[in-house]
Image (cartoon, grey):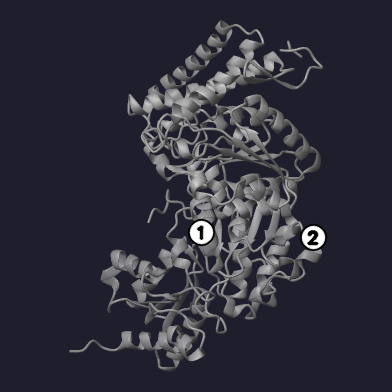
Amino acid sequence: MAVMSYAEAAKQAIAEAMRADPRVWCVGEDLGRGGVFKQYVGLVEEFGPARVSDAPISEAAIMGAAFGAALVGTRPIVEMRFADFALCATDELVNQIAKARYMFGGQSRAPMVIRKPMGMWRSSAAQHSQSLEAWYAHIPGLVVVCPSTPQDNYAMMKAAIACDDPVVYLEHKNIWALEGEVDPDAPGAFGQARIRRQGGDVTIVSWSDCANRAAAAAAMLAEDGIDAEVIDLISLWPWDKAAVLGSVARTGRLLVAHEAVAVGGFGAEVVATVAERAAHRLKVPPRRIGSPRGLIAYAPNLEDQMRVTAEAIAAAARQMMEPAPA
Amino acid sequence: MGRTAAPPGAAEEAGIGGRVIRRNLDIDTGLDRLAMMERIRAFEAAAERAAVDEGLVLGAIHLSTGQEAVATGIIAHLDRADYMTSTHRGHGHTIAKGADPVAMMKELLGREGGCCGGKGGSMHIADFGVGMLGANGVVSANITIAAGAAHGVKLLGGDQITVCFFGDGAANRGPFLEGINWAGVFDLPILFVCEDNRYSASTRTADMTAGDSLADRARAMGLTAAEIDGNDVNAVAEAAAGAIGRIRATGRPEFLHAVTYRQGGHTYFDPAAYRPPGEAARMAETTDPIRRQRELLADAGVAAAQMDAIRAEARAEMEAALDAARAAPWPPAASAFADVQDIGSPQREPF
């Protein structure tokens, strides 16, 4: 066990994978100087500029070329800098990478990790703050990961690099410096949620940094005598339906919290799945809490209006615990 | 070495009877090129017949009739291990790279045994066994992918080169600039071949393209680039020999702009009525690469009957491929869910 930051955890996972497998390499803008968030610092010194490769500001080429390199036997880690910029490479990801194995009848694989730093961070406004994980969960062929802790960023990064499928790997920019214990021997598993807190009153499902806020909300709720169970999905495709359904069967209450816009968000998928399979277990209607369908502003007071806070999650859970009006 | 059409030492090209013929052409090589072009044309003809007469080809197919010299001349200088990416108009490239026409025809008909198991169809033809990394349904998208294949080869220390075929329309999308810049920046062993058939779907490419020269766009990014007659298979092959030889020696990318002509419509069901009256007939008369190669070989003394036999053999091969495809069953229904992904596969978790 070692204490390290969320950013360091992923870097350590990458370094270990690169030492073990010469086919693993990283490519993206500014990687030679450690990357825009310094999440690659030191890697170029150890592995050299060919395997920790700088790139032109050409998102489509970064994604497309990494894909081509994957087709001939390398295992690229693709850095998109900001999840928002990955939209410049949408054809490469959605039409090419996600579909190649199938379209070519299983002749090829695209073993790629596509890192897309996401989420609201420090007055970054509308083009540098988005949470678009639901888009990728919608695309067959992709695995989607949204880790929230150093442990999971280490273990899931290792799992993603080892995976033969393309993995959209969405790290939250706001928690690069978040520190926590990392057990290098605890493997990451896709589709296996982490129960951040056990509880019997209400199930709160979340992922990415919002899972940390959900955990904080659960602590607040505990002070009010409400015993919340917090499920951190970690991966959205596949996602741990069994953990959610099992929890809801015990609590009878489902609240899904995510930073992304609520409308069409992945919370809708979670709620719909529970409604289809376990509606009879629900004591109160399920709820989802996400960003209003508005845009993220620069000014902090405007930005805050789109934010899903621990307080808001706790307030929603409290409402669900109130007795139904007579 | 086989027979030659003209004595060694003569001028390399000379105008004879209003036609330029290439001297010192090895006749066996010339016949090989003719045979490959005939096979490509025969495949396209069989596919078109299967589509039009029998309704067996279900989706759109984009025929390369008239463009055979580019695929034939370039790929003649590739090894099986070399990589190639192609376009929605990719049957010719795929045949020339060595793919099995039976598996290809089955793919066009969506049948079991198709090279992609019936999942891709014409626009996603691929045969990784011969280095054919896929046709592509998105114009220009294969340019960055091909650059990446070359990048991967370089990282792995391989000696394969990559050839990227794309059309004239692709030069107006971003991946053209991004992919060529990438190859230049990273010094990648790749040959970009712009197979210019003069039409971007139903639009004359010249009407929607700024500037005079696509090759100049590549030159501006530091690549050695040449414009060649894409309807002269021997000129294409000669240019390819030079470029590919240099790429193998230096590892540096190059660019060829091969001007040819799409004799049919964008798809087999496009009558291409937007072309100026008489253009197609005039071009078929004056630029058709198979006609030109036959005339060249005839001038060199090859009997018409020998060339007719090559054509008949190609047609028989592709007719047999169509017969085999016609007789093949649909793919098993369960395969619809296979080969999407390992983790979260729809075979286990479709919803």
Residue holding disc 1: A90
Q: Nearer the viewer, residue B7 or B350?
A: B7
Q: Quadrant of the C terminus of chain B?
A: bottom left
Residues marked 2 and 1 touching at CB (< 8 Å): no
Which of the marked residues, 2 or 1, is nearer the chain's N terminus?
2
Q: Percent from the top left, x then y, of residue A33?
A: 75, 70
Q: Amino acid at mark 1?
A: Thr
How many C-alpha atoms fall within 10 Å of the one at disc 2: few (<14), some, or many (≥20)? few
Chain containing the residue with disc 1? A
The residue positioned 45% from the left and 25% from the top of the image is B281
**Residue at mark 2 shares a chain with residue at mark 1:** yes
Horizontal arrangement in the rendering, residue A320 relative to residue B63 (left or right): left
- From the top left corner, tell me how far across and down residue B221 is, in percent: 70, 53
| A60 over A200 or under it: above or below | above
B223 relative to B161, above or below: below
Q: Which mark identifies residue A48?
A: 2
Q: Is residue A185 left or right of residue B55?
A: right
Q: Residue at coordinates 39% horizontally, 71% vertically from top-left?
A: A267
SS for dot 2: loop
Look at the picture and state if A53 lies above or below B321. Answer: below
2 vs 1, front mark: 1
**Most foreground residue, B255 or A83:** B255
Chain ID of residue with mark 2: A
Q: Identify the residue at horizontal 68%, vertical 36% (top origin).
A: B82
Residue projecting furthest to the front: B18
Q: What SS does tag 1 mark?
A: helix
Residue type indicated by callout 2? Gly
Quadrant where the N terminus of chain B is found in the figure: top right
Work out which residue is located at the far bottom of the displayed protein and give it: A223
